[in-house]
Amino acid sequence: MSPVWLVARREIRTRVRTRGFIIGTLSIIVIMGAYAGLMTFIGNQASTTKIGVTAEAAAIGESLKAAGPNFGKSFEISTVPAPVAEQQVRDGDLEALITGTPEEPRLVVKRTPDDSIQAALNAIVQQRTLDAELARFGLDPDAVRATAESAHVAVTSLETEDPHRVERLVLAIAAGVVLYMFMIIAGQMVAQGVVEEKASRVVELLLSTIKPTQLLAGKVVGIGLTNLLQLLIIAGTGLLAAGVGGMLTLPSAALASTLAWALVWFVLGFFTYATVLAAASSLVSRHEELQNVISPVITVLVVPFVIGVSMLPSSPDSTFAAVLSLVPGFSPTLMPMRIALGVAAPWEIAVATVLSIAAIAVLLRLGGRIYSNAVLRTGSRVKVRDALRAS
């Protein structure tokens, strides 16, 4: 293992000290923070609706403001002078204007009224009309309303609703996206490193002192640890920011378990794809040919990611996704997403882990053989069949 660690340490030192690693890590953190801030700002803007009321209809403003949360909105009410009120609607300063009287209000909009505003206003007008009719017949509107509101339907729930469902969903998608991104980046780094060493003949010098399999293992371990460090920094920063901002209410045990398994599956997924990509890239001698040999491998990595983000949010208990999450190569993306959603059974996690480790062992043997027999052969592209033969 000494030669393997020497190569791995060289990869770590070379890459961690580069400006690209530092700037890339900071850039991702900044982008994540900016995206979260933008989504929060857009969400707040989308949920706040500016509505103007004239002096005659001012009495209806408080009722409309109180009704906003029932429609998932926050109505910002302001009293505006009648002469300039409609112009503010035309200019877009107000999304709607309420004129007339509280008994007969009139909604003024630029084009089409917002459904929530119209529904809230209709509910207020209907309630006022009902109160007036009850009072006309000598009944107390407040007493009648209290009696009506006390009536309710008895509900029997067959399953318990998860109070953290939305958080689990966000965490699952974030885990899938981050792992997918990092596995592609790390895998391509391995492939490019192999081709660079092969094209520059550096590999010939290295192989004069260590075995090809040791060089391959050292490169994979070194790049893997480098990206694992970057992943820990980014994930740790993101979780810390979410915790400080009060956006995470998941139990600490569930959060720690999700994070730990995400790191485990990154390691398993990285070794799976990095070994295949290293072997595939050793078949060519030029950067121009690299994409032709690594594209099929990247495609295999894209498929489970697409399935995960498109299927799991709407169908967490999908049997199709559960079966695919046990398949080596698909597990590193799908299984951590299912774990984050809380739908992966312990036996499924155990089976997927064992199968992935077994697959890595097979791939290391085949990949090492291909790499050993192809990395020193320059010129035209080496066929996989020829690389598998004994040199």
Image (cartoon, helix red, strand yellow):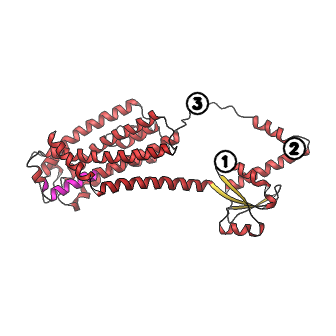
Circle number at residue 350: none
Q: Gap in Å between the C-alphas at discs 1 and 3?
A: 28 Å
The earlier-in-sequence mark between 2 and 1 is 1
Is 92 left or right of 307, judged from the image as shown? right
Indicate the amino acid at tag 1. Answer: Pro
Q: Estimate the x, y position of residue 366 in percent, counting from the top left.
A: 19, 43
What residue sits right under mark 1 in the picture? 69
Residue at 68 percent across and 63 percent down: it is 94
What residue sits right under mark 3 in the picture? 158
Indicate the amino acid at tag 3. Answer: Leu
Residue in front for this viewpoint, 24 or 164: 24
**Disc 1 crowd, CA 10 A, few/some/many (<14, 14-19, 20+):** few
Indicate the amino acid at tag 2. Answer: Leu
Q: Which residues are magenta?
A: 187-202
| Closer to the eye: label 2 or 1 | 1
Q: Is residue 331 in view from this perspective?
A: no
Q: Estimate the x, y position of residue 55 in percent, counting from the top left.
A: 80, 61
The earlier-in-sequence mark between 1 and 3 is 1
* Element carrying mark 1: helix
Q: Is residue 282 above or below residue 359?
A: below
Circle number at residue 134: 2
* Element carrying mark 2: helix
* Element carrying mark 3: loop
Is 196 left or right of 309, judged from the image as shown? left
Is 147 left or right of 87, judged from the image as shown? right
Q: Estimate the x, y position of residue 99 in percent, counting from the top left.
A: 78, 61
Q: Main secondary structure of the magenta part?
A: helix
Residue in front for this viewpoint, 156 or 38: 38
